[in-house]
């Protein structure tokens, strides 16, 4: 495959196995829910079913620009609907295992050497023709013998033109929300996904390690952010900093553009960061201090660290998430931070920074082998700033694998 090393010969078989597992799991869920077809419209879920990301879905976030139509019937190939310009990037493996249907956009691709042997001759549209794309969806469903029955799709994310076109162009079908179905499928990672996430955690920690080397009084969050991004982007497979919330001193609020406040002696330096490789990203956090920490900061950090230690002690397969939340919240409060108040203490992670399920008081889901989760004990306060410890873990049959190697101590810089 002519792609990055994520899809090189060494990883190719793992990627193909990932595609097989996703298809197998999806069909099992469709059988359980009596769903005849599963249609992915969002960037992440299209990528999950198709096996390759859509540039236009990620860039425009408009439902319907690309679709993956999977059938419960194993004799029917998954249909990928996308524009002909983007279809030229599809790996050969996906062309073999899926049926690809394309539609024209404003971009014309010439064929002077007759490589494709065909050429679109009609007038090019100025923009995406959503109605025409949903007509293609209806045709794909009919060809897949889904003329009646239940189709699961992402109704919640559809803009009105897409929703209107869906109902105008499809008849005799019952559409049901697919959000929970995708959530359950994506919460258990394949080996290919786990390897990517392990790499993103390593890369984010490398970014932190290199960034703190330049940290001293007078440093700004913008300086540290630039160093973090430069470091992780040295990996040719890294797409971007999935997350780079870096704060110094009392300015704890997240910023799209990092602060230029110059750090002073005793200021807290908090990294809540991640790296993106092939659309999968890490999310981890560490806290440092410029010089000597104030006594109040030490007290707060000790309570958070005690709670985080307890998180790592009790998490494992079969443990209910709300039970973990309740116990750890109690530990933190008993450790001296009586005002501590959180909606959750962690979450799944993968294609999105924070994915369900969450370690929250209402979540009865248990930790399962194959889950990759981020466990966190964050704290924000006026006059103090941001303090945070967050680790990425792979839940295993007997416990977990911690993707993080950096110390969880409050280190003076």
Image (cartoon, rainbow, N blue to C red):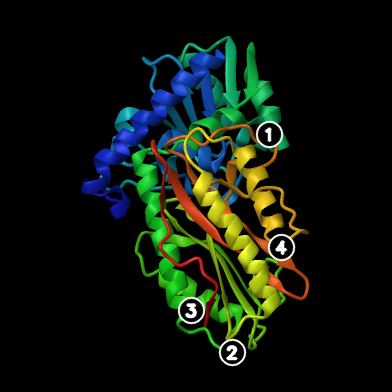
Give the residue at mark 2. Answer: 217
Report whether 206 appears left or right of 258.
left
Quote the CA–CA distance across marks 4 and 1.
42 Å
Residue 273 visible (yes or no):
yes
Query: In what element is the residue under mark 1?
Result: helix
Foreground: disc 4 or disc 2 = 4
Q: Residues within 10 Å of mark 1 (few under 14, many from 20)?
A: few
Report whether 112 appears left or right of 286.
left
Comparing 13 with 294, the one in front is 294
Residue 176: percent from left, percent from top: 64, 21
Residue 6: percent from left, percent from top: 32, 51
Is the C-beta separation of discs 1 and 3 under 8 Å? no
Query: In what element is the residue under mark 2?
Result: loop
Position above or below: 90 against 33: below
Label number found at residue 156: 1
Comparing 243 with 332, the one in front is 332
Say which label, 1 or 3, has the lower sequence index.
Answer: 1
Quote the CA–CA distance across marks 1 and 3.
42 Å
Say which label, 3 or 4, has the lower sequence index.
Answer: 3
Q: Residues within 10 Å of mark 3 (few under 14, many from 20)?
A: some
Q: Residues within 10 Å of mark 4 (few under 14, many from 20)?
A: some
Query: In what element is the residue under mark 4?
Result: loop
Give the residue at mark 4. Answer: 336
Give the residue at mark 3. Answer: 212
Position above or below: 162 against 233: above
Say which label, 1 or 2, has the lower sequence index.
Answer: 1
Residue drawn at point x = 45 percent, y = 19 percent: 28
Say which label, 4 or 2, has the lower sequence index.
Answer: 2
Report whether 383 appears left or right of 391.
right
């Amino acid at each position: 495959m002519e792609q990055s090393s994520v899809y090189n010969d060494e990883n190719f078989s793992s990627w193909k196995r990932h595609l097989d597992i996703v298809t197998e799991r999806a069909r099992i869920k469709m059988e359980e829910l009596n769903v005849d077809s599963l249609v992915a419209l969002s960037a992440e879920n299209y990528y999950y079913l198709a096996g390759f990301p859509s540039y236009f879905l990620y860039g425009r976030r408009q439902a319907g620009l690309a679709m993956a139509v999977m059938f419960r019937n194993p004799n029917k190939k998954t249909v990928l609907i996308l524009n002909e310009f983007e279809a030229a990037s599809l790996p050969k493996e996906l062309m073999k295992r899926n049926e690809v249907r394309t539609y024209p956009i404003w971009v014309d691709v010439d064929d002077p050497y007759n490589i494709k042997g065909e050429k679109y001759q009609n007038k090019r549209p100025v923009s995406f023709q959503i109605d025409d794309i949903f007509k293609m969806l209806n045709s794909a469903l009919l060809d897949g013998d889904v003329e009646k029955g239940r189709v699961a799709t992402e109704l919640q994310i559809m803009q009105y033109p897409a929703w209107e076109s869906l109902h105008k162009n499809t008849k005799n079908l019952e559409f049901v929300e697919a959000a929970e179905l995708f959530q359950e499928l994506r919460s258990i990672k394949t080996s290919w996904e786990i390897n990517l996430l392990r790499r993103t955690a390593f890369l984010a920690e490398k970014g932190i390690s290199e960034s703190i080397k330049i940290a001293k009084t007078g440093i700004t969050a913008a300086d540290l952010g630039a160093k973090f991004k430069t470091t992780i982007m040295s990996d040719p497979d890294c797409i971007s900093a999935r997350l780079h919330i870096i704060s110094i001193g009392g300015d704890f609020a997240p910023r799209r553009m990092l602060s230029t406040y110059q750090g002073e002696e005793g200021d807290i330096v908090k990294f809540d960061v991640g790296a993106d490789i092939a659309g999968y990203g890490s999310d981890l956090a560490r806290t440092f201090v410029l010089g000597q920490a104030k006594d109040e900061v030490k007290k707060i950090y000790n309570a958070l660290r005690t709670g985080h230690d307890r998180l790592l002690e009790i998490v494992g397969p079969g443990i209910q998430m709300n039970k973990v939340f309740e116990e750890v919240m109690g530990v933190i409060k008993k450790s001296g931070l009586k005002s501590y108040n959180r909606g959750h203490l962690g979450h799944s992670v993968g294609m999105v920074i924070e994915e369900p399920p969450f370690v929250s008081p209402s979540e009865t889901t248990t930790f399962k082998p194959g889950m990759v989760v981020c466990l966190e004990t964050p704290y924000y306060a006026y006059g103090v700033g941001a303090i945070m410890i967050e680790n990425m873990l792979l839940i295993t049959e007997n416990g977990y694998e911690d993707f993080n190697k950096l110390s969880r101590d409050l280190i003076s810089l």
